[in-house]
């Protein structure tokens, strides 16, 4: 509930739309009330051929008396003409305001939706890697689409009802009371109608409640069907190879039948609601008609007043029904808002320290001092890591899969904060620098090449808006990417997502290298690809990488022999620590773990 109130701040910038909508609601409801009032002259003066007869037992405002006298004095045919024109006008105005009310409320909802989406999106960009490691992507996507949708629905529909229905209640009640007061409706009739109300509502409410419960179960049952379907489609190969078609079908049949039965249950109730509601309604009306009709027949009550009274009464039912339904909508919205705030309240674990300064240039060296790190408490991934790398040097990091190589390099751009020790650039702790300025000095090329659904040019100059095309082309040329880009239908303006654009693995890698070359950072983190390319492609990629590495300080997770051979130093990670370090030659002489790794991992790769 607290979150719900907090959420109202999203409405604040759009309060004027809300105000306009409320004005429209009041006016359309007032017109609705006026249309009910018109029943009296239509029935009494035109249909019954009498005059409007107001009770004389109450003091009635002078203007009303003279107004009614005037109506009574107008010749019938002329009155009919007037009444038809007035009723048409009333409905015209009512529907016009109804249109604007719907329009404004939808505008309010959609404006809030737009604002919330961008706030969540920004938050997602702000959050650190550990958040993503612990959150399912599907969950996040459903927050920003599904939950936000529910919230907006609760505004456009829920808030409308919350405002509109009470207004209508007031209008119809006012009409009821004035009819009671001015047209001497007996207390018996009032009490009978009031007593009959709950009787009329009971069966519909009862069935509705049951229906809601069934619908929750139906939804769960549907998600069983969906996940069974997904499982099968994704794992079709496995299902077939294990000959599990029958087994899966049997399982699916159970879900399918369960859903069918559940749905039929709700169909039965949906089909029941209207006949039962109507039957009970007619019964109740019959009772009211019996009491009221008697009074009309005995001349104690005017027919017009009685019909208007009934109409106002029937009009009251809808606001009551809608308000009771509102609770359900709001419960859903509160749950969705709470889920959205769980993301919005998430604090990024990596952020600028207060008073962080800019890293302006990298001049001298990078040091890891006694660095320790763990993803989860009590299970350290890295311990006592000490590295010293002079500007321009290449450090090759080797180790078995899962040893912690990627983790180690991800600490430098502060994707995660170190738990122990510190990382220094030119003698200053990287935590003292602003994240932006630190990351501006570091380029990263990973095995997994991520291209964005944008033009080749924008993929290379990623994140920049004012793009120097010569620089892009120079980067692409150095990355051996220029010639295949030029073969594409629109060259650098070709969009990655365009139909028919096929980019091979090697080409993707060269685009990623071009992106890093364009950024031209002094420090480079490189995760060499392990995937096998054909030898021509391999040569083009290797050439591009060599150009990328030139004149940079490089941390390379090495999978190639040539990389480790030419590295200025090699760090061998095993058992959470740097077990050995030195040059290729030194380490081979040492005849320790590097030698073993070398024989296992690197040497055979060359054949
Ligand atoms: P390498 O790059 O040498 O293959 P990683 O640095 O990827 O090794 O992983 C080192 C260890 O940390 C592994 O045991 C891995 O399971 C674990 N690990 C990697 N990423 C995460 C993460 N986001 N959350 C928790 N544990 C992780």
Image (cartoon, rainbow, N blue to C red):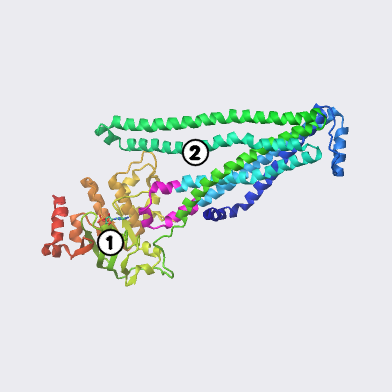
Q: Which mark is residue 480?
A: none
How many tags in the picture? 2
Please provide percent x and percent y for residue 77.
84, 27
Residue sitting at 55 percent across and 46 percent down?
330
Please report the bounds of the magenta region as a residue range.
Answer: 117-142
Disc 1 under 8 Å from ligand 1? The reply is no
| Quarter of the figure with residue 502 | top left
The magenta stretch spans residue 246: no
Say which element carries label 1.
strand
Q: Which residue is mark 1?
A: 380
Residue sitting at 22 percent across and 47 percent down?
532
* Quadrant field for ligand 1: bottom left
Residue sitting at 21 percent across and 60 percent down?
575
Of residues 57 and 475, the one nearer the viewer is 57
Query: Eyeballing the image, is 402 above or below 387?
Result: above
Please provide percent x and percent y for residue 46.
81, 28
Circles 2 and 1: CB atoms closer than 8 Å: no
Q: Badge 1: how crowded within 10 Å, few (<14), some, or many (20+)?
A: few
Of residues 123 and 56, the one nearer the viewer is 56
Query: Eyeballing the image, is 105 above or below 553?
Result: above
Of residues 491 and 428, the one nearer the viewer is 428
Which residue, as the protein is rendered here, is positioned at the far bottom?
427
Kindly tell me whether residue 67 is visible in this rendering.
yes
Please provide percent x and percent y for residue 589.
11, 64
| Quarter of the figure with residue 381 | bottom left
Q: Main secondary structure of the magenta part?
A: helix
Of residues 98 and 63, the one nearer the viewer is 63
Q: Badge 2: how crowded within 10 Å, few (<14), some, or many (20+)?
A: few
Q: Which residue is mark 2?
A: 213
In this rendering, position of residue 114 left or right of residue 56: left
Q: Nearer the viewer, mark 2 or mark 1?
A: 2
The magenta stretch spans residue 119: yes
């Amino acid at each position: 509930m607290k979150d719900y109130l907090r959420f109202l701040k999203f409405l604040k910038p759009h309060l004027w739309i809300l105000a306009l909508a409320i004005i429209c609601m009041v006016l359309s409801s007032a017109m609705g009330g006026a249309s009910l009032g018109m029943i009296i002259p239509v029935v009494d003066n035109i249909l019954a051929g009498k005059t409007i007869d107001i009770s004389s037992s109450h003091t009635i405002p002078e203007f009303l008396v003279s107004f009614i006298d005037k109506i009574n004095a107008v010749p019938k045919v002329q009155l009919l003409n007037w009444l038809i024109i007035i009723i048409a006008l009333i409905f015209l105005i009512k529907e016009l305001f109804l249109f604007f009310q719907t329009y404004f409320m939808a505008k309010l909802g959609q404006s809030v939706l737009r604002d919330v989406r961008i706030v969540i999106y920004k938050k997602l960009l702000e959050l650190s890697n550990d958040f993503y490691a612990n959150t399912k992507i599907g969950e996040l996507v459903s927050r920003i689409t599904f939950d936000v949708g529910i919230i907006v629905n609760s505004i456009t529909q829920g808030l409308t009802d919350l405002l509109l229905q009470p207004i209508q209640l007031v209008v119809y009640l006012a009409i009821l009371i004035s009819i009671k007061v001015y047209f001497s409706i007996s207390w018996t009739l009032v009490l009978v109608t009031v007593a009959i109300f709950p009787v009329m509502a009971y069966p519909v409410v009862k069935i509705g409640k049951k229906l809601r419960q069934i619908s929750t179960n139906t939804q769960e049952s549907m998600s069983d069907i969906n996940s069974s379907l997904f499982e099968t489609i994704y794992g079709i190969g496995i299902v077939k190879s294990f000959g599990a078609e029958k087994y899966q079908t049997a399982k699916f049949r159970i879900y399918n039948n369960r859903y069918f039965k559940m749905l039929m249950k709700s169909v039965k109730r949906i089909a029941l609601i209207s006949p039962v509601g109507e039957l009970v309604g007619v019964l109740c009306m019959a009772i009211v008609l019996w009491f009221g009709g008697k009074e009309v027949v005995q001349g104690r009550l005017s027919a017009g007043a009685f019909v208007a009274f009934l109409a106002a009464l029937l009009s009251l039912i809808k606001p009551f029904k809608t308000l009771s339904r509102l609770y359900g909508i709001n419960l859903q919205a509160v749950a969705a808002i709470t889920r959205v705030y769980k993301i919005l309240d998430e604090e990024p674990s990596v952020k600028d320290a207060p008073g962080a300064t800019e890293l302006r240039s990298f001049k001298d060296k990078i040091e890891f001092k006694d660095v320790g790190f763990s993803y989860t408490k009590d299970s350290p991934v890295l311990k006592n890591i000490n590295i010293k790398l002079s500007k321009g040097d290449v450090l090759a990091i080797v180790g078995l899969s899962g040893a912690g190589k990627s983790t180690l390099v991800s600490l430098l751009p502060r994707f995660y904060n170190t738990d122990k020790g510190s990382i220094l650039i030119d003698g200053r702790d990287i935590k003292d620098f602003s994240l932006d300025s630190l990351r501006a000095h570091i380029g990263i090329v990973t095995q997994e090449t991520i291209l964005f659904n944008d033009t080749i040019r924008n993929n290379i100059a990623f994140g920049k808006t004012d793009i120097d095309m010569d620089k892009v082309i120079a980067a692409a040329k150095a990355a051996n990417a220029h010639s295949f880009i030029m073969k594409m239908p629109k060259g650098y303006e070709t969009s990655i997502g365009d139909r028919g654009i096929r980019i091979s693995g090697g080409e993707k890698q060269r685009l990623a290298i071009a992106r890093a070359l364009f950024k031209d950072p002094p420090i480079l983190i490189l995760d060499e690809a392990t995937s096998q390319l054909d030898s021509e492609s391999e040569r083009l990629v290797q050439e591009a990488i060599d150009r990328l590495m030139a004149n940079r300080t490089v941390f390379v997770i090495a999978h190639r022999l040539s990389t480790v051979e030419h590295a200025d130093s090699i760090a061998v990670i095993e058992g959470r620590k740097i077990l050995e370090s030195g040059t290729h030659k030194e380490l081979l002489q040492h005849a320790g773990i590097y030698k073993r790794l070398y024989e296992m991992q690197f040497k055979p790769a060359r054949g």
